[in-house]
Each structure stands twice: as C-alpha cells, then as structure tokens.
Image: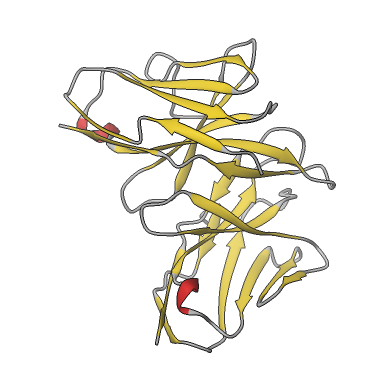
Amino acid sequence: RKEVEQDPGPFNVPEGATVAFNCTYSNSASQSFFWYRQDCRKEPKLLMSVYSSGNEDGRFTAQLNRASQYISLLIRDSKLSDSATYLCVVNKKDGGSQGNLIFGKGTKLSVKP
Amino acid sequence: SAVISQKPSRDICQRGTSLTIQCQVDSQVTMMFWYRQQPGQSLTLIATANQGSEATYESGFVIDKFPISRPNLTFSTLTVSNMSPEDSSIYLCSVARLMGQGGNEQFFGPGTRLTVL
C-alpha cells in the first residue's frame, strides 16, 4: 500500500459544482495532515491543515477519519480559480520537530465555465 | 508565513557539472528542508538542513551527491553534484512552523527548475 494515496483524477467540473477529494494513508502513527494546492509550474501552497474534529475554511471543508486512515477535502461552489492540483500530505513521524512530509501524487481539478 | 526565495529560478546544465541552489528566508527559522519534484511526480524529501551540523538525509539520498550547507537560521544551499539527466527536476526548499498540536506546517520556496542535458 502506498504511504499516501489519492484519487487519480482528473476531475472536470462546472463552476458552482461541489467536488470531493479522498485520500488514504498507511502509517497509523501519523499525527499531522494537510491539503496543499499546487498550480501548474508553481510551488505547493498550504491550503489547510486537517484536524481530528474536522475543519472548515469558507468553501473548503477537510475531514479526518483516523480509524479508517482517511482524509477528505470538500470544495463547495467551485470557482474557475480553484483549478489546480490538490495534494494530500501526511507527516511521516509522530508529530515532533522533524518535518518529513509524505506527499500524495495529487488530484488535478479543472473547473470549467 | 515567511517569505522564501530561491536562486536560480531555473538552469540548464551539462552532464557531469554541479549546481548550487540557494534558499533565503526573510526571518529566522529552525527547520529548513530540501525537496525534489521530478516531472509528473509528487514531492520527495531529500534532507533536513540542520544549522550548525550535518544535514539529515532521507533514504536514497547521500551527502556526496547532494551536499547541503546551513550556515545560519535564514539561509541554506543545496548542491546537485556530478549531474546526469536523471537529476532534471524541480528542487524546492521549505521552512516549517510549529503547530499547537506538536506537528508543523511547511511553506515552500518558488523552486529551482533544473534541466540536465
């Protein structure tokens, strides 16, 4: 099983649609979880951290299910500017000060007018 | 978040040569890292750049091939030595900010796009 596995995509959706990305991770000891966004030929940018209780930031909702080792990202009311690759990221070690992040391969989202 | 710059932004190099990439942060940070993103792939951690001591390398990466310097808390360099076409990649530095739960959030520089002929 890959350390971090995501939907392969691409997701092609119309503006205004709701889209959900799923991600599973293999290391049950992982403590930190993130969604990053990467635009074409740009560096990844932190979209949101994912907390055990789930968290929401505007149109974006992230959820974590530790029992199933599953992370999700929901985007409501998609905008053209949401088009990007979304990376599921897990901290390899048990928190701590080391920053070994394991990146999924990403899911490409294309929002069409 | 910190402002991170990298130089050069891109380069085309000949096989067998070496390239040193610089990463500058606008504030002091404890943790700095170097990643590689090969074409069509996701990011892979090369090493943790430790200030005042040798870098900590991940499996598959060695100091002779990727020497790293970290002379202070705002600056680091990564050298890609004796390059081959397989080293063509984007190289990114990142810095970490501690989170309340004990983990950390990482922020990336703009990357250096390297092509080896």
Locate residue B61, reporting x and y percent: 44, 26
Choose top left, top right, bottom left or bottom right for residue A108: bottom left
Residue appearing at x 59%, y 54% in the figure: A89
Say whether residue A53 is left or right of residue A112: right
Say whether residue A108 is left or right of residue A25: left
Of the pair A3 and A63, the residue shown nearer to us? A63
Residue appearing at x 60%, y 44% in the figure: B107
**Quadrant location of the C terminus of chain A in the rendered image:** bottom left
Choose top left, top right, bottom left or bottom right for residue B117: top left
Residue appearing at x 56%, y 21% in the figure: B75
Say whether residue A36 is left or right of residue A56: left
Of the pair B53 and B1, the residue shown nearer to us? B1
Q: Is residue A73 above or below residue B55?
A: below
Of the pair B69 and A27, the residue shown nearer to us? B69
Residue appearing at x 53%, y 89% in the figure: A16
Choose top left, top right, bottom left or bottom right for residue B104: top right
Say whether residue A42 is left or right of residue A25: left
Q: Is residue B23 above or below residue A113?
A: above
Locate residue B28, reporting x and y percent: 69, 26
Q: Is residue A64 above or below residue A112?
A: above
